[in-house]
Amino acid sequence: MMTATALKYLQLSLYRAYVDLRVEASQSHLGVIWWILEPLVYLAAFYVIFEVFLQRGGEGFVGFLLCGLVFWRWFDNGVKKLSMSIYSAAGLISQVHVPKLVFPLVDFLSVTFRFLFVFIVFLVFAYFYAGELKAEWFILPLLLFVQGVLILGVGGVLAAITPLVPDVKKVVDNLLMVMFYMSGIFFDISTLSPEYQQYLLMNPMAVLLQSYRAVIFDVGSVDWLRLMLVAGGGVLLSLLSMWLLLKLDRYYPRVLGR
């Protein structure tokens, strides 16, 4: 029974995500081509600025920087969008009953699908930048899975709380800004003293970014223990978000309808 219900939710979420993406693509003349052009321009801009004009950061810095920015962008966009998924659907929720689990899942699928275009473009860049295709790249699906679970967990819990306390959005925006600068996007955490590393690696995205760089550009090594802790934390938060969304399912229409 539970499996059938979960499958129904997943099918509904996939269909709604497909519809949302199709509508988004139809709103411009180039459609899905923009999903390829946008990451190309994004990566090209940083490459030209840091590699051609500034020539700063040393050898391999541009790849190091772009790796951090690409995967951070998925986390940042995902958490922000999921956190507002129920709150922004107040009109629909007040009119018809839709399982609230669906809303964060739809937004996660939408954000992740868009991210895959960026990811593919980045892998092509990484191949030419590094000059080789490494066997370690087969670990990437595992890292993507861990980050996906983390986004679902963090974003899902925030989605459940935000309709009750709308000010959470401002807290989230500021916390993400702090996390951005403490994730090691612009610097290599492994070059710092062990004391500072210990504190910075409490940030799950710092652990993930180090892992991506180790796999893609052979910068450092994957800390499997910390990665397992990030995965475990993501799973626990995902389960908590499911419990909250199910528990508060009938309460949201009253709160959002005020």
Image (spheres, grey):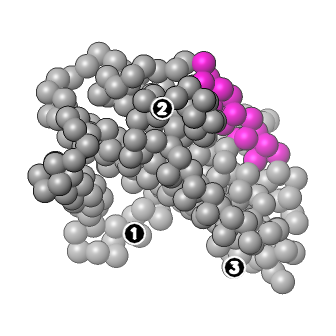
Q: Amino acid at mark 3?
A: Gly
Q: Amino acid at mark 2?
A: Leu
Placement of 223 over or under 92, stated as above or below:
above
Q: Is residue 30 magenta?
A: no
Q: Residue at position x 47%, y 63% from top?
A: 19
Residue 192's disc number? 2
Residue 91's disc number? 3
Q: Residue at position x 52%, y 20% from top?
A: 223
Using residue 86 as the reference point, say whether residue 65 is left or right of it.
left
Q: Amino acid at mark 1?
A: Glu
Residue ranking furthest to the left: 52
Q: Residue at position x 31%, y 38% from top?
A: 64
Q: Quadrant of the C terminus?
A: bottom right
Are the residues flagged by discs 2 and 1 in contact, CB closer than 8 Å? Answer: no
Which is nearer the N-term, disc 2 or disc 3?
Answer: 3
Q: Secondary structure at mark 3?
A: helix
Residue ranking furthest to the top: 135
Q: Secondary structure at mark 2?
A: loop
Nearer to us of marks 2 and 3 is 2
x, y percent for residue 143:
48, 29
Q: Nearer the viewer, residue 253 or 152?
A: 152
Residue ID for mark 1? 24
